[in-house]
Image (cartoon, grey):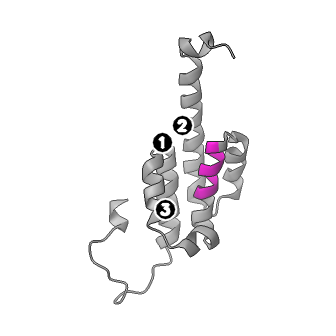
């Protein structure tokens, strides 16, 4: 989210915004929805370590990404009800659409069906 990255540091002049972490969390979920996992991790690296563990707006997308990597899609779906803000539910719904689309693409691939374990 380019609007969150400023080339100048204004932290000494402006007070911290109460909307900073809700917006950063929404951006993280947006990156997951767009299947931009590398950008997701790059964005995480720019956050303070405390935010990763203590901030509910950041922990939610971090958990979503972990469950996606595990293949625990039911946990992703149930996380919709645990969203820290109403706006997050839209992105979780969109993320589920991304999961369905990717699953459908894999299952419709003829090579998938020809593989025998």
In the image, residue 73 lies at what x, y percent? Answer: 68, 40
In the image, residue 63 lies at what x, y percent? Answer: 64, 55
Q: Residue at x 32, y 83 (%)?
A: 10
Q: Is residue 111 left or right of residue 72?
A: left
Picture quadrant of residue 49: bottom right
- In space, the residues marked 1 and 3 are separated at their CA atoms by 15 Å
Q: Which residue is mark 1?
A: 35
- Between label 2 and label 1, give the one nearer the viewer: 1
Magenta range is 61-69
Q: Residue at x 69, y 52 (%)?
A: 79
Q: Residue at x 34, y 67 (%)?
A: 5
The local secondary structure at tag 2 comes to helix
- In space, the residues marked 2 and 3 are separated at their CA atoms by 21 Å
Query: Which is more toward the observer, 75 or 91?
Result: 75
Farthest residue, direction bottom: 13
Q: Which residue is mark 2?
A: 98
Q: Which residue is mark 3?
A: 44
| CB under 8 Å between discs 2 and 1 | yes
Is residue 62 inside the magenta stretch?
Answer: yes
């Amino acid at each position: 989210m380019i609007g969150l990255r400023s080339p100048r540091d204004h932290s000494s002049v402006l007070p911290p915004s109460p909307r900073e972490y809700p917006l950063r969390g929404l951006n993280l979920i947006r990156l997951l929805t767009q299947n931009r996992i590398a950008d997701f991790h790059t964005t995480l690296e720019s956050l303070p370590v405390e935010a990763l563990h203590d901030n509910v707006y950041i922990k939610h997308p971090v958990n979503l990404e972990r469950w996606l990597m595990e293949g625990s899609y039911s946990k992703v779906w149930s996380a919709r009800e645990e969203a820290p803000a109403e706006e997050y539910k839209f992105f979780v719904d969109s993320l589920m659409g991304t999961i369905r689309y990717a699953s459908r693409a894999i299952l419709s691939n003829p090579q998938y069906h020809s593989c025998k374990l």
